[in-house]
Image (cartoon, helix red, strand yellow):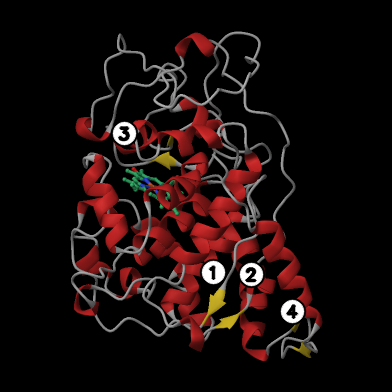
Amino acid sequence: MVFKLSVGLLALATLASAANFKRVACPDGVHTATNAACCVFHELADVLQTQKFDNQCAEDAHEALRLTFHDAIGFSFMAGPSQGTGADGSIMLFEDTELLDGANNGVDDAIDNLRPLLQQFPISAGDLIQFAGAVAVSNCPGAPRLQFMAGRPNATHPAALGLVPKPEDPVDKIFARMEDAGFSPTELVSLLASHSIARSDTLIDNRQAVPFDSTPFVFDTQVFLEILLKGNESLPAASGEAPAQVPNPLAAQGAMRLQSDFAIAHDPQTACFWQFMVNNPNAVAGGFHDAMAKLAVVGQDTSKMIDCSEAVPIPVPAVNKPATFPAGTGPELLQLSCNSPFPSLATDPGKATTIPECVDGDTNLNDCPS
Ligand code: HEM
């Protein structure tokens, strides 16, 4: 099966079109921009990096990325705009209503972190959410530089409850929900690269920051590999939202696995694409770039928007480590639902160790146990 990557072409096209524009000096006296409307985002990027994310791919960055999805998915082709207008900031503007949906548990952290910036910068809530997500991702080694289009009008009403997929939902229900917002099952797989930099704060009793893979601070392909490993049935599921979880091989190391991720990894419509992602960082980054570009403008009229992608920082370099079976696991644990050949991967040496809870050198005390 051949999956085309467009990220390289996109990068060339962006360079070529940027060269056609004369840059304007921004009022802050610091930045220049291809379009004066992008100046505010250059300034905002600096503030996000220094005051909100500490230039880290840590908790606040992860939460900002999750918020992009929970805002944008509030859209339904079938039900029409009265039920939500997509990436429109409604989750921030109508938080009291949208957070009645249990699928939005935990997104208040990102809303509280980002909302004060609406007082500081003359931008809409939808632009703030999608831009913050793109800046956040740039801190994660291996992530692509995401596109950012500016110009979302503020939402005038909340999205309907029930539009955000839940981890306990059957896979067909999740695919149908995503299709109703314009995404194919394989585009969903591409979006789920986000779970490579993700941890749960709400699903397990008395525990926060429970990672979905062994490398939650690196945008890599480990999550695609680790979800294909047989779960450890002998360890009791952690207490909490039981239907949201399925057994996983790294429970003793502190990880958890979402039922939804597991089901999508094994569904006949997506199993081969999921498997194709393992140890294929270009496919993961390219697919994520393209699917995020689509997610960020759900429900929006892009003909009225301005491309301010240049204000998104250039991502930190990739770690460039091939995917490996975490110590204590190995190929014997593979549970495959696709017949394509599986890549030959090494196993990390040594004993299984607990997954780190914070990034090395993290200055945000909220992310690191003292
Ligand atoms: C089938 C679709 C999806 C389901 C069911 C799902 C479910 C979840 C759940 C239950 C959590 C844990 C929340 C918590 O307890 O704190 C989570 C975390 C996360 N999700 Fe998803 N998700 C989906 C798709 C996406 C997409 C499309 C994105 C981004 C484009 C995304 C980004 C994230 C991130 C970054 C986190 C980690 C947040 C943190 O570490 O604080 N998810 N997701």
The amino acid at mark 4 is Ser
Mark 1–mark 3 CB contact (< 8 Å): no
Mark 1–mark 2 CB contact (< 8 Å): yes
The amino acid at mark 2 is Ala
Q: CA distance from mark 4 to mark 3?
A: 41 Å
Q: Earlier in the sequence, mark 3 or mark 2?
A: 2
**Which secondary structure, mark 1?**
helix
| Tag in front: 4 or 1 | 4
Q: Residue at x 58, y 55 (%)?
A: 137
Tag 4 residue: 17
In the image, residue 107 above or below residue 218: below
Residue 201 x %, y %: 36, 41
**Which secondary structure, mark 4?**
helix
Q: Residue at x 42, y 76 (%)?
A: 125
Q: CA distance from mark 1 to mark 3?
A: 30 Å
| Dot 4 beta carbon under 8 Å from ligand 1 | no
Tag 1 residue: 131
Residue 191 x %, y %: 46, 51
Q: Earlier in the sequence, mark 4 or mark 3?
A: 4
Q: Is 285 left, or right, of 78 in this rendering?
A: right
Q: Residue at x 49, y 73 (%)?
A: 128
Q: CA distance from mark 1 to mark 2?
A: 8 Å
Tag 3 residue: 263
Tag 2 residue: 45
Residue 278 x %, y %: 56, 32
| Tag in front: 1 or 3 | 3
**Which secondary structure, mark 3?**
helix
**Which secondary structure, mark 2?**
helix
The quarter holding residue 320 reads top right
Q: Earlier in the sequence, mark 1 or mark 3?
A: 1
Give neighbour class at mark 4: few <14, some 14-19, many 20+ (Cα, 10 Å).
few
- Does residue 329 appear in the picture of this structure? no
